[in-house]
Image (spheres, rainbow, N blue to C red):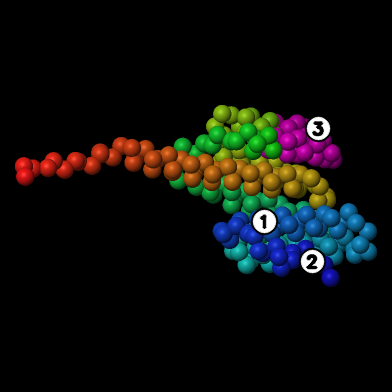
């Protein structure tokens, strides 16, 4: 029996439904890749169909829109189209996170920035492996450099970074015929950016509340009258 998702995977999920789906999809994709790499005796087409079925059902459960299995006859064409839907949906989820502070820019932590740039190197390697024209590859590299430039800003525009990432993931998903490193890198970057945005929003709110508290007038002292 194929178990891409297990019962204990549901024990430590985020509270928000769409984030639950993102995490479970990532788990299912990781296990699928492991099974494809092993000599399990199960046909690749069966494994890939199982992955799409599980993730599609989870998308329905957690009300994630625009994720569906295409009717293409070729399994790899179906998988590519499905991965494209998944990538778009995840990017939409992360980009729709609206911080409660007005600036829309985040000073990424050093660890987050380092992880993202390392993952962008994986994407660069994947682009080099694509069987595409030199012109198409140059266009992808320009998108990747735009993304890296935004990540390296003192305060990163999360929405802009996710827009570059979505453009990259869309093209790569359309031209990749197997589950390589790039889809995992895209998903991980989305999660890091989302976590950084939420963390910064919480800190901004804390500072705003602290500033409000400091600006409040001191309570008037009671002046004792004559006894």
Q: Nearer the viewer, mark 1 or mark 3?
A: 1
Where does label 2 land, which residue?
Answer: 3
Region rendered in magenta: 116-142
Q: Nearer the viewer, mark 3 or mark 2?
A: 2
Mark 3 falls on what kind of element? Answer: helix
Where does label 1 land, which residue?
Answer: 23
x then y, percent, for residue 223:
13, 41
Where does label 3 land, which residue?
Answer: 134
Q: Which of 181 and 177 is in front in this view?
A: 181
Q: In which quarter of the image is the N terminus?
A: bottom right
Residue at position x 6%, y 45% in the image: 227
Q: In the rendered view, does 147 fall on the left or right side of 127?
A: left
Task: Examine the rendering and report whether any part of residue 147 can be seen.
Answer: no
Q: Residues within 10 Å of mark 2 (few under 14, many from 20)?
A: few
Would you say residue 40 sits in the magenta stretch? Answer: no
Q: Nearer the viewer, residue 26 or 83?
A: 26
Mark 3 or mark 2, earlier in chain: 2
Mark 1 falls on what kind of element? Answer: helix
| Residue 82 numbered mark, or none | none
Q: Residues within 10 Å of mark 1 (few under 14, many from 20)?
A: some
State which quadrant residue 216 falls in: top left
Q: How crowded is mark 3: few (under 14 residues within 10 Å), some or many (20 or more)?
A: few
Q: Which of 217 and 9 is in front in this view?
A: 217
Query: In the figure, 51 relative to 87: above or below?
Result: below
Residue at position x 91%, y 62% in the image: 40
Q: In the rendered view, does 34 fall on the left or right side of 114?
A: right
Would you say residue 121 sits in the magenta stretch? Answer: yes
State which quadrant residue 29 falls in: bottom right
Task: Examine the rendering and report whether any part of residue 152 can be seen.
Answer: yes
x then y, percent, for residue 208:
40, 40
Mark 2 falls on what kind of element? Answer: loop
């Amino acid at each position: 029996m194929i178990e891409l998702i297990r019962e204990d995977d549901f024990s430590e999920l985020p509270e928000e439904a769409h984030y639950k789906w993102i995490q479970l999809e990532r788990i299912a994709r990781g296990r699928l890749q492991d099974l494809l790499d092993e000599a399990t005796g199960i046909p690749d087409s069966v494994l890939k169909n199982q992955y799409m079925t599980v993730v599609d059902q989870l998308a329905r459960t957690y009300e994630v829109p625009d994720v569906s299995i295409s009717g293409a006859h070729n399994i790899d064409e179906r998988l590519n189209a499905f991965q494209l839907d998944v990538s778009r949906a995840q990017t939409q989820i992360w980009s729709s996170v609206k911080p409660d502070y007005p600036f829309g820019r985040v000073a990424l932590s050093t660890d987050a920035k380092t992880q993202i740039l390392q993952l962008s190197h994986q994407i660069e390697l994947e682009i080099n492996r694509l069987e595409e024209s030199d012109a198409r590859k140059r266009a992808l590299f320009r998108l990747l450099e735009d993304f890296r430039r935004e990540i390296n800003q003192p305060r990163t525009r999360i929405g802009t970074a996710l827009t570059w990432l979505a453009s990259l993931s869309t093209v790569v998903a359309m031209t990749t015929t197997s589950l390589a490193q790039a889809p995992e890198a895209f998903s991980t970057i989305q999660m890091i950016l989302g976590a950084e945005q939420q963390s910064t929003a919480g800190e901004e709110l804390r500072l705003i509340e602290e500033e409000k508290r400091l600006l409040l007038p001191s309570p008037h002292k009671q002046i004792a009258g004559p006894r």
